[in-house]
Amino acid sequence: MVTRPPGGDEHRDAAIAWFVRLQDCDDGRVWRDHFKWLEGNPARVAAFDAVSRLWVRLDDLSPRDAMPESNVVYLSERRPRPLRRHLWWIPAVAAAAAVIGWTQVGQNRSPASETIESAADAPRVIDLADGSRLTLNRDSKVKISLSSDERRVELVSGEVAFDIKHNAARPFTVFAGKRSVQVLGTEFNVLNYGGAFAVSVRRGLVAVSPVPGNGESRELPAGTTLIQRPGGQADSIIPGAVDEAFAWTTGRLVYIDRPLGEVAQDLGRYDRTTVVVAPELARMRVTAVLTIKDNRSLDRQLELLLPVQIEPFGSARRIVPAR
Amino acid sequence: MTITTMDEASPWLAAFLARQVDLKRYFAARVGEVEAEDLVQEACLRIATLPADTNINSLDAYIGRIGHNIMLDRIRQDRARARRDTEWYNVQGTFAPSGEKVHEAAPADDALIARERIRQMQEALGQLPEPVRQAFLLHKFDGLSHAEIAERLGVSRSSIEKHMMRALKHLMKRLGG
């Protein structure tokens, strides 16, 4: 698709040059010149907006998608393929993809299950033979059993984004702790960690079983999130929060008006430690986008965004007001 | 983001207030007078919540960066909203009279379109010469600065900027704005 940029190539090229120049620019004069370049010139504004929109659209492309096909590992082929490491492909965000398929004629009752874990420092993508895809967040563990009449995944611990191909003859069910999530063709995220349970639905509809002995199963349409907090007996269903829940799949953590405690839990989860919140910050709410790199970097990003600092606290870390 | 204490006002706030006319003109040029006021408020909030000991070399550059980021965030929010609206419509529109929930058709289309877009992006990226592509991916997805990429690849910072321009020019031609 070729879109003729407003104002022609000249404005487009100038807008691109500005966009690139401003990426790491600490020079106040350059920024002032940029403001002057834009002001009172709608054609330049339109060209610069077009570059900005392209930049944002490219967010959709996760490092996984940008990765060359040759990095995909086909487990079912049972032959090793060299993992071509690219310089830009930092292991911390590496997600080696795997394709898993079983054909189990006559074994429908007791399908073999396969346990798959992701590493502590990298998410992992699993493609099922039916076209469904599971993306495991770091440090997550699932047991998958596929048979000709059903598909079951147990989320033992961690977080998984599911993109499921609908097949009425082979229902897909996710088990997490004492809860289950029944799936139609859909895309959703399940968290089962440290007593917290959450389901966010991006597409389609799922049915979530209740906390045992407490109510009935709830149906969650696209665009909603169900949360059971650690130790909680009741679920809350909130509209939205869906893109945020999926953000980790593109290497980001997104919080829109969330309690600081939730951010602390994520910081702890990403490096297997504990992060607590000082009492005076307990009511603080956070709107932020963090980029998942190493854990120290997460701490630093939070310190830059909020008037807080993160300090050692015994074997754990503690978020306190910035001094 | 909650502002916990406003009484010890940020040292940056006064300097920002002195420059807010410039920022408002900038936002007005990009989104019009009406919305510019809101965006200036948002910029003000971001400045006010900055830790007092933040090291800022140039306040003009910092304010320019905030204006730029707010515009990018605004585009992101517009897209997220559009996506949610479509999804809501799809779910609402796909309850079959039998009570059976049949909603693969439209969402599957959406997924197909989304995948097709991703495929186009992959293809366009794949057409770039390797050093250009590498520099672009290191910056866009790994968040390395131009200087860091230059060091890592052993080339000058200005050649990284040229790579970045070349990549964006190609992607603009192939994918549009």
Image (spheres, coloured by chain):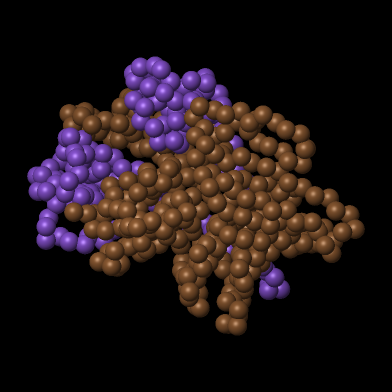
Chain colours: A brown, B purple
**Residue A71: % across, % down:** 63, 33
- Single out the residue that lies furthest toward the front: A314
Q: Is residue B36 above or below residue A166?
A: above
User: Is residue B159 visible to us here?
Assistant: yes
From the viewer's perspective, tell me whether residue B109 is left or right of residue A231: right
**Residue A212: % across, % down:** 60, 79
From the viewer's perspective, tell me whether residue A282 is left or right of residue A290: left
How many numbered circles are shown? Answer: 0
Q: Nearer the viewer, residue A158 or B155?
A: A158
Quarter of the N terminus of chain B within the rendering:
bottom left
Q: Quadrant of residue A112?
A: bottom right
Q: Nearer the viewer, residue A271 or A313?
A: A313
Residue at (34, 25) in percent of width and height? B147
**Residue A316: % across, % down:** 38, 57
Residue at (70, 31) in percent of width and height? A81
Q: Nearer the viewer, residue A311 or A293?
A: A311
Residue at (51, 27) in percent of width and height? A87
Quarter of the C terminus of chain B within the rendering:
top left
From the viewer's perspective, tell me whether residue A239 is left or right of residue A139: left
From the viewer's perspective, tell me whether residue A173 is left or right of residue A309: right
**Residue A321: % across, % down:** 23, 58
Q: Quadrant of residue A31?
A: top left
